[in-house]
Amino acid sequence: MAGYNLKEIMNKPERLSPGHRMCAGCGATIGVRAVLRALHEGDEAVIGNATGCLEVSSYMYPYTAWEDSYIHNAFENAGATLSGVETAYRALKKRGKISPDTTYKFITFGGDGGTYDIGFQSLSGAMERGHDMVYVCYDNGAYMNTGIQRSSATPQFADTTTTPVGSLSNGKLQPRKDLTAIIAEHNVPYAAQTTFTRDFKDIHVKSEKAIYTEGACFLNILAPCPRGWRYDMADIMKICQLAVDTCYWPLFEVENGTWRLTYEPKKKLPIEDFLKEQGRFKHLFKPGNEDLIVQFQEEVDRRWEDILFRCSR
Amino acid sequence: MRTDISRINEHTPYEELTEGLMMFAGGTSKSFKTGEWRTNTPIFHSEKCKQCLLCAPVCPDGCIPVKDSKRSDFDYDHCKGCGICVKACPFNAIEMVPGVEPVINS
Amino acid sequence: MSIKDRMSGNEAVAYAIKQIDPDVMPAFPITPSTEIPQLVSNYIANGQMNTEFIPVESEHSSMSATIGAEAAGARSLTATSSCGLALMWEELLVAASNRMPCVLALVNRTLSGPININCDHSDSMGARDTGWIQIYAENNQEAYDNMLQAFPIAEDEHVHLPVMICQDGFITSHAVQNIILNEDKDVCEFVGEYNPGEFLLNKGNPVAFGPYALSCYSMEAKKAQEKAMEDSKAVIAKVAKDYRERFGRGFTFFEEYRTSDADHIMIIMGSAAGTAKQAVDDLRNQGKKVGVLKLRVFRPFPGQEIANVLQNCKSVAIMDRTESYNGHGGPLSSEVRAALFESKTYPEVVCYTYGLAGRDFTVEDVYEIFEELENVSSNNNISIIQHRYINLRTKEDR
């Protein structure tokens, strides 16, 4: 991997055009732009997409924001659909119908609903079969497209429209599923977790590895949703930084079974710092709910220790 | 069979829409102007800009054009006015002003 | 030249797939269609074909991957039965609305519940309004012949719709019968090379599939799809004619068996048509003017053509191998009665449900049905049950 230079990288032509209908301040398209910048110039790509915010907003007939070939099929089958595309590429190349000097890369995007939940089987199948593709989850921690319903990526205690805070409820009961680890346990050659950092080096380097590592690769991007998380939309970079500095969203990669931390906060911040910025956790700061924050912190600590253990092996 | 989207609108007869509503073209969204969604508008003060480009990747809409490692003024046809770039700039070279027009009201 | 052999229906369809040698085949095992992907996998494992096989983790994924591969520009197909087809139901609609000329080899089996592995048409009939062309076979020979016609129909520029090639589970799929196979090179010539105009892997020409469409476009898109289904009739007829001229076999929309002077006609699909034809021969020997219309193409529905055949007969038995749960007969009954009404043709009509979940259907049953038709048409005062089950146990039997 050559040295990362943001000023060089930003010269690349945009592969996601403006004019898409994602909300102002959306994290998903920041993630998409970052991933696509990792494609080498001259390489072709086919982009897959699970149904979700990104899909309905980026290809509303007749306006496609995608400069590359693009296929949306349905909600739960982005993995399988791109399996078919990637296999077609191999089949057509074998038969000489695609020139040997043409390189295609296959990248599919899905939200956490389409990836952790309804598309989980299709994703697992595609990963296990080892198609030469990258599945990118933009994880905003709920079904945002349909109006902020909880998913298995939603953090514990989050106030969502299907886990509303009420007189008998403190939001979602369960902590979130750790999908990156689950996909890493498929023994894929590359799986990583990332988000937006100041110079975008982490997401760029991981995207390039994921795209250019042969086999099925997985990228999980924490992509905040200002509407669902209820923070000031201009603050996305701060939110992401707090997610990693509190170790809520550790940055790591798993390459051929070896776990590696790609960022370790100099000083691990208390989880309150991350929670208090977001309206979905507002209730945790009411008097009498102190134990809920303690509980949240304990879960973050336990998982962080687990990752440190895995990365130290 | 490349698509000319200027010929596709709510008056187009069914026989003249693309087969399966496929789009035989890339990047056609550029002709859809999301700039009118703005309620606040970023103003670029080039004299303060050090061309660090930290603003360019944070834009959800790719509205900060970069050429030869230098950014130019905003793509106001599409900028939705989220303000993320303002906070990403370490040099106060981007200012947010109210309204859809990129003008500073004195 | 043709090759005489003995094969089951599954073997015949797998052999046709080998000869077509499509680019991609994703599939998932389900009784009774499992043998098709097994046999194809064996052909591939032994270098007898070049297809890329994807052993997907579900039928939803097999149809999803078929769509992905087809969109990418690869000739693609899959195979399934019963619950597998039900699981891919959403994707059947996506394949058709995205105008994918892919193919599905369906081995008809009943749908749960109760879970049962035997034949009826509840799977494909449930998918009749998904926008797929549906072609049914009486036996292994027809399953083979139909399979070879699937891609030329689907890929025709006036069609661009997916095609479902149906055969009856176990009865056809597993029974070994004589068969005449075509030479590989003749199949190659007949099926031809697939050269799509627009596809994902067309370098320098990006294409986008699967948009969100507002109401101002969605209805028009559906009409365009419906028009393609209408237009497919002419293409199905042309492909059937070309096949007949080249290989000497096959029918267009249906087979008319001793119908020209028949007073009483049975309309039936699939393997039971063989039983019906045997019974017709027996009854003809007794001087009874009876015949069979064996429907080959259910989608698009050849309503006018069927009504033309029925215009001079006295009575018609419509045989449904599925239940619609609408209180008055199965889907074939509904379609045929609508076609008769539209063409102002009014024979006596009786709707029968038979053979659900593999229940036997015998020549004796056919005798009985024709006897009932004769009674109905000769005696206006007779009261008969319009929607009757064949070979069903009831309290009245005691």
Image: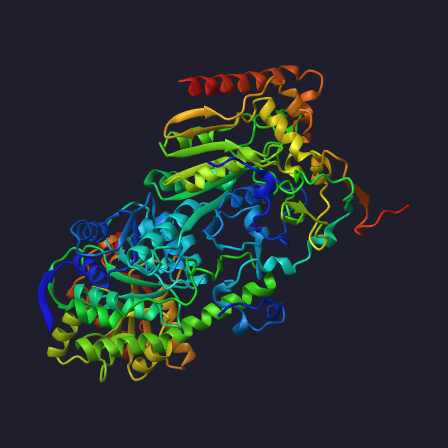
Residue C56: give x, y in percent of width and height: 32, 45
From this viewpoint, is residue A267 visible? yes
User: Which residue is more in the foreground, C347 or C378?
Assistant: C347
The quarter holding residue B42 reads top right
Residue at figure coordinates x 12%, y 60% from the top left: C7
From this viewpoint, is residue C367 visible? no
User: Which residue is more in the foreground, B104 or C199?
Assistant: B104
Q: Residue lying at the far front in this picture: please name it.
A: B68
Residue at figure coordinates x 50%, y 55% from the top left: A68
Up/down of C260 relative to C5, above or below: below
User: Which residue is more in the foreground, C295 or C151?
Assistant: C151
**Is B96 placed left or right of C306 in the picture?**
right
Q: How many marks?
A: 0
User: Which residue is more in the foreground, B44 or C10?
Assistant: B44
Residue C199: give x, y in percent of width and height: 42, 61
Residue at figure coordinates x 37%, y 42% from the top left: A126
The quarter holding residue A102 reads bottom left
**Is B66 placed left or right of C123 in the picture?**
right
Up/down of C332 relative to A250, above or below: below
